[in-house]
């Protein structure tokens, strides 16, 4: 597996007990790796695809040391408050690999599902978080509304961000625009090009 998160370097930049929000948790692999380095972390994850969510839960149950430190929620993170959101997926089964709010994100996404929605602002308020050491975002295009539509106070308390970014247009939904936006909020950014024609964007608070 490609080390797209630069995990060795990443953990050295985090405190021993970091607070982490994981948007697009998949089956929990990033968190399993993170806790291998930082066993006293606290991580709150969100995953909209049911099969991934169930596998994530299985991984937590199979590792008793993670209980109370790692939690996963079956929900999609969005920009604006709403009860639910429609996601376009590649199969009517529960194990779709990709799910996006954009119908044209992937031509194989010919089915759709409705899932519970939550905003980043709601996540912070519900969990009473006054600081976040790491925000990890991997959500197939939803990175744009999440970042652009979150209230300004969020960028005062989130210290480090890692985002998988997909170029969707030449206006605001591209890696250069997203990087400029975060830099205007006080972050220093760098990025890598990934093999699947998207980018890994790293942002650290100055």
Image: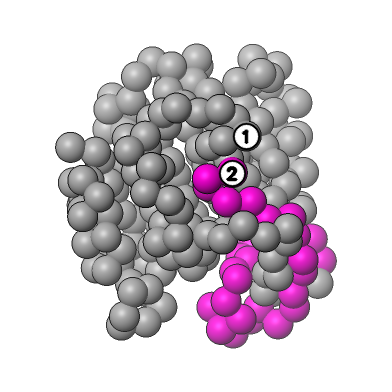
Mark 1: few, some, or many residues within 10 Å (few <14, many ≥20)? few
Q: Residue furthest right?
A: 93
Determine whether 181 is above or below 187 in the image: below
Which residue is drawn at the image coordinates 81% and 72% (left, top)?
Answer: 92
Secondary structure category for the residue under label 2: helix
Q: Which disc, if any, is residue 10? A: none
Mark 2: few, some, or many residues within 10 Å (few <14, many ≥20)? some
Tally the marks. 2
Is 113 one of the magenta-colored residues? Answer: yes
Marks 1 and 2: in contact by CB < 8 Å? Answer: yes
Residue on which disc 2 sits: 122
Q: Which residues are magenta?
A: 93-122
Which residue is drawn at the image coordinates 66% and 18% (left, top)?
Answer: 68
Q: Is residue 95 visible?
A: no
- Name the image quarter holding the C terminus: top left
Estimate the x, y position of residue 193 in percent, counting from the top left.
28, 63
Determine the CA span between mark 2 and mark 1: 6 Å
Determine whether 42 is above or below 188 in the image: above
Estimate the x, y position of residue 29 in percent, counting from the top left.
56, 39
| Among the 4 quarters of the image, the one containing residue 106 | bottom right
Residue on which disc 1 sits: 126
Secondary structure category for the residue under label 1: helix
Determine whether 197 is above or below 37 in the image: below
Q: Nearer the viewer, residue 177 or 15?
A: 177
Which residue is drawn at the image coordinates 53% and 23% (left, top)?
Answer: 42
Is 60 one of the magenta-colored residues? Answer: no
Which residue is drawn at the image coordinates 67% and 74% (left, top)?
Answer: 88
Tell me if 183 is positioned left or right of 89 in this view: left
């Amino acid at each position: 597996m490609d080390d797209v998160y630069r995990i060795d370097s990443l953990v050295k930049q985090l405190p021993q007990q970091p607070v982490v929000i994981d948007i697009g948790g998949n089956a929990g692999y990033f968190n399993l790796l993170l806790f291998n380095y930082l066993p006293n972390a606290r991580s709150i994850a969100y995953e909209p695809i049911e099969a991934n969510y169930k596998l994530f839960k299985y991984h937590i149950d199979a590792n008793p040391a993670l209980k109370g430190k790692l939690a996963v929620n079956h929900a999609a993170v969005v920009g604006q408050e709403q009860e639910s959101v429609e996601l376009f997926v590649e199969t009517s089964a529960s194990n779709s690999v990709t799910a996006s709010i954009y119908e044209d994100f992937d031509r194989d996404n010919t089915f759709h599902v409705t899932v519970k929605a939550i905003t980043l602002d709601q996540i912070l308020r519900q969990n009473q978080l006054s600081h976040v050491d790491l925000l990890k975002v991997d959500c197939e295009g939803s990175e744009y509304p999440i970042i652009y539509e979150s209230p300004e106070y969020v960028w005062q308390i989130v210290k480090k961000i890692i985002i998988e970014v997909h170029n969707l247009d030449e206006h605001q939904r591209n890696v250069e625009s997203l990087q400029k936006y975060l830099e205007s909020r006080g972050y220093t950014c760098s990025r890598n090009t990934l093999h699947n024609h998207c980018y890994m964007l790293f942002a650290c608070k100055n």
